[in-house]
Image: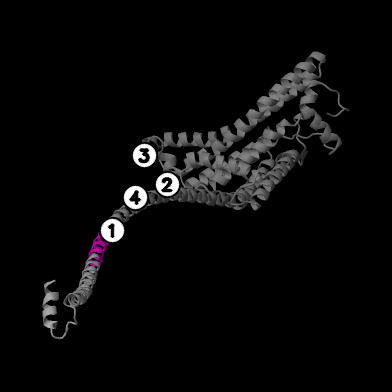
Amino acid sequence: MSTEHALTPSSYITHHLTFSTSGQGFWSLHMDTLIVSGLLGLLTFGFLYWVVRGVTAGVPTKRQAAIELLVEFIDDQVKGIFHGDRSKFIAPLALTVFVWVLMMNAMDFLPIDVMAWVYEHVFGQDHWRAVPTSDINTTFALALSVWFLMIFFSIKVKGLGGWIHELFCAPFGSNPLIWPANFLFNLIEYVSKPLSHALRLFGNMYAGEIIFLLLGMWAATGLVGTVFGALLGAGWAIFHILIVVLQAFIFMMLTVVYLAMAHESH
Amino acid sequence: MDITFTLIAQALTFAILIWFTAKFIWPPLMSAIESRQKTIADGLAAAERGKHDLDLAAKRSAELLREAKEKAADILASGDKRATEIIEAAKLQAKVEADRIIAGATAEIEQEAFRAKEQLRSQVSAIALAGAAKILGREVDSKAHNDLLDKLVAEM
């Protein structure tokens, strides 16, 4: 944390929750989010590519077996939800979502104040938020991408006419009198899907970060605060392992469910 | 909570990652997994087939063993039979041979006895002649009494 500001609870939290921004207004970019998520993507998928390049159909290495375990786990999940040719797009998408979100969530494990010191003194960044999924831009980027894919697959599978027909004639029936009700229902569904999809992940990761910050603040209040802050911080970090994996899994499952629903005709 | 252009940039990153995974990571890994699954399935099927073949072979070998035992018993029985036959035939032949030898020996003995008798007879006639000559005190003309002597020899 920067030493030139007076250390108050609000300045501490503001300091930790300020993005490293470049540009103004809508056209500004959160450099921390973009760089961390980009690096994680590069590292993770580069690693996967490295493993896959040495892949063998014979006796696998332990490294390959671990990756196969992950891939088969995801393939199983997708198989249970999506009935169709999943290996062309849906399953790789699920793998991408799970692995990338998991890695981005996992940045939450880095101790915030230690990392703040590193960002400031090693990289010269006064503000740096390391968890891309606690940036609403990231979660909405993912959720809206899935949303557009959902509409794309709906139109692709049912045709434009079929999709519009479904907007007005599902779920209650094709009587013209209930077209408005159907349309309203579908509208709410189409709005609520990306909202809940994006906000669930964002809320969980943001809340996790806030709790770490609050515990960090408590730790600064004295010996008792330090002991309890450290203990509870450890407890929260352990619990956070579950949240990080669970949220990545939920995000992936919802992605698959939404896209599977888009493939089904009513 | 400020939505900025970051969203679009993140969506772009996301799209690139999806494309990369779908093109370079998923297909080779899946094809490796599937071909290994096929290899394992083939191996299991082959093992099953091998086990079945083993069962068949065991059955077949038991059958062969049983047949061989039967054949051996047959051969043994026919060997025994043949041996008794040979022994019987040998016995028969030996008997015949023995009879023949006995008959030969008997004939020879008879012949020998006859010859001895003949010799004896001729010697007896000579002795008788000599004895008679002594008794008569003179030479017996063997020519004159030959037929008489012959009659004597024949009577003996």
Region rendered in magenta: B83-101
Are discs 2 and 4 both within one chain? no
Could you tell me if residue A160 is visible in this image? no
Q: Using the numbered discs, state the Cα–Cα distance from disc 2 to disc 1 in whole angstroms.
A: 106 Å
Label 1 marks a residue whose chain is B
At x 77%, y 18%, the residue is A218
Label 4 marks a residue whose chain is B
Q: Is residue B84 left or right of residue A249?
A: left
Q: Secondary structure at mark 3?
A: loop
Label 2 marks a residue whose chain is A
Which percent across, then down, holds residue A207? 67, 26
Which percent across, then down, holds residue B117? 20, 71
Q: Using the numbered discs, state the Cα–Cα distance from disc 2 to disc 4 in whole angstroms.
A: 76 Å
* In contact (CB < 8 Å): disc 2 and disc 1: no
Q: How is the image coloured?
A: one colour
Q: Secondary structure at mark 1?
A: helix
User: Is B92 included in the stretch rendered in magenta?
Assistant: yes
Q: Please tell me the numbered disc located at residue A174.
A: 3
Residue bearing the label numbered 2: A162
- The answer to whether B92 is drawn above or below residue A171 in the figure is below
Q: Nearer the viewer, residue A218 or B114?
A: B114
- Give the farthest residue toward the front: B137
Q: Secondary structure at mark 4?
A: helix
**Nearer the viewer's eye, disc 2 or disc 3?**
2
